[in-house]
């Protein structure tokens, strides 16, 4: 699985066009839709973004809920009704819709923030503050990751 890594800041022009970093476009290459899918983050003043394959995985997650349940209705309204397909132009740019610009507080610059299987678009100053706080919290809490278990369980035995 290809991952979105790093943070890159690009200029947003007066029309709301911004170049998606080449490394991010590379992760998205080969998908049926030549662009990104984006929606306002539930947690942060940012746009959540990924490829159509990522949206399909979110759809599969929503399918775990009963079709007419409150949870299913809430998630589909929050995810799919707000999601927008933003096609790449010939120069690898997307046109940011007004609602995403407003939600993320974007002006003349946008930070593309890798988050593994997806990425976010932030106001660079807002993200710098958030990231500094996240690093501080991770250090204070001693957060670590466990290594993945080898195939077959402990010690690799089937």
Image (tube, rainbow, N blue to C red):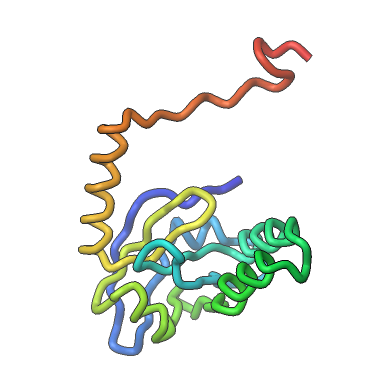
**Number of residue marks:** 0
Residue 135: image location, x then y, percent: 27, 41
Position of 11 with respect to 114 (left or right) is left
Rendered position, 118 above or below 18: above
Rendered position, 155 above or below 35: above
Residue 95: image location, x then y, percent: 43, 82
Q: In this view, which residue lies farthest toward the front?
A: 70
Residue 84: image location, x then y, percent: 55, 78
Rendered position, 105 above or below 118: below
Position of 68 with respect to 77 (left or right) is right
Task: Place residue 75 in its image quadrant.
Answer: bottom right
Task: Place residue 35 in its image quadrant.
Answer: bottom right
Task: Place residue 40 in its image quadrant.
Answer: bottom left
| Residue found at x 78% / y 14% | 158
Position of 61 with respect to 91 (left or right) is right
Please state which of residues 91 and 102 is positioned toward the viewer in this rendering.
102
| Residue found at x 69% / y 67% | 72
Please state which of residues 93 and 47 is positioned toward the viewer in this rendering.
47
Image quarter where the N terminus lies is: top right
Residue 7: image location, x then y, percent: 33, 54
């Amino acid at each position: 699985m290809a991952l979105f890594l790093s943070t890159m800041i690009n200029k947003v022009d007066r029309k709301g066009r911004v170049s998606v970093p080449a490394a991010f476009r590379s992760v998205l290459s080969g998908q049926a839709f030549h662009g990104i899918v984006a929606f306002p983050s539930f947690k942060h003043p940012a746009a959540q973004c990924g490829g159509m394959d990522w949206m399909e995985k979110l759809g599969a997650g929503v399918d775990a809920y009963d079709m007419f349940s409150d949870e299913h209705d809430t998630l589909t309204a929050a995810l799919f009704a707000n999601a927008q397909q933003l096609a790449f132009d010939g120069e690898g740019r997307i046109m940011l819709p007004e609602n995403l610009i407003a939600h993320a507080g974007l002006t003349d610059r946008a930070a593309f923030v890798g988050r593994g299987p997806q990425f976010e678009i932030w106001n660079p100053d807002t993200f710098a503050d958030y990231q500094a706080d996240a690093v501080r919290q991770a250090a204070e809490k001693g957060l670590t990751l466990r290594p993945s278990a080898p195939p077959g369980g402990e010690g690799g035995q089937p």
